[in-house]
Image (spheres, grey):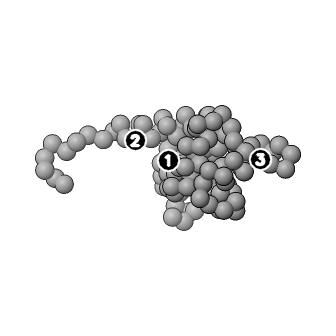
Amino acid sequence: MGATKTEEFTLADITIAKYAKALGHPARIAILRILLERTSCICGDIVEELPLSQSTVSQHLKELKEAGLIKGDIEGKKVCYCIDAQAWKEAQQLLQVMFGKYKPCDTSCC
């Protein structure tokens, strides 16, 4: 989607798409699961738990951070990552609203 078309959509739609894109890879889901099990995590610890290289994990962390789902603080030569509570809550609320609007079709339309 071209950048010039984003004004055609609601802010909620754009935000949901941003979160969905970040959630659209199994490695990112695995990273989020690791972070949810802990209150914070150093990047090297994440690499040890996944069958991916350091550079690949770093790229996935970057995508999650750009979407706002995680935060990262520099601690010396390492970066400590954690879930961004505010963005996590926003994503949860937006997705719940969207999924909550589903109503089963009362005919055999599909």
Residue at 77%, 47% (x, y): give it. Answer: 79
Residue at 70%, 62% (x, y): give it. Answer: 55
- For the residues labelled 2 and 1, the Cα–Cα distance comes to 9 Å
Pointer 1: what residue? 16
Pointer 3: what residue? 79
Pointer 2: what residue? 98
Residue at 59%, 48% (x, y): give it. Answer: 31
Would residue 75 be seen by someone viewing this image from the given angle? Answer: yes
Residue at 58%, 38% (x, y): give it. Answer: 36
- For the residues labelled 3 and 2, the Cα–Cα distance comes to 34 Å
CB within 8 Å, label 3 to label 2: no
Of the two numbered discs 3 and 2 on the same chain, state the one appearing first in sequence.
Answer: 3
Packing grade of label 3 (10 A; few <14, some 14-19, many >=20) is some
**Where is residue 103 drawn, in percent x and y?**
26, 40
Of the two numbered discs 2 and 1 on the same chain, state the one appearing first in sequence.
Answer: 1
Between 85 and 104, which is closer to the camera in this rendering?
A: 85
Between 22 and 57, which is closer to the camera in this rendering?
A: 57
Marks 1, 3: nearer the viewer:
3
| Residue type marked 1 | Ile
Q: Is residue 38 above or below residue 18?
A: above
| Residue type marked 3 | Val
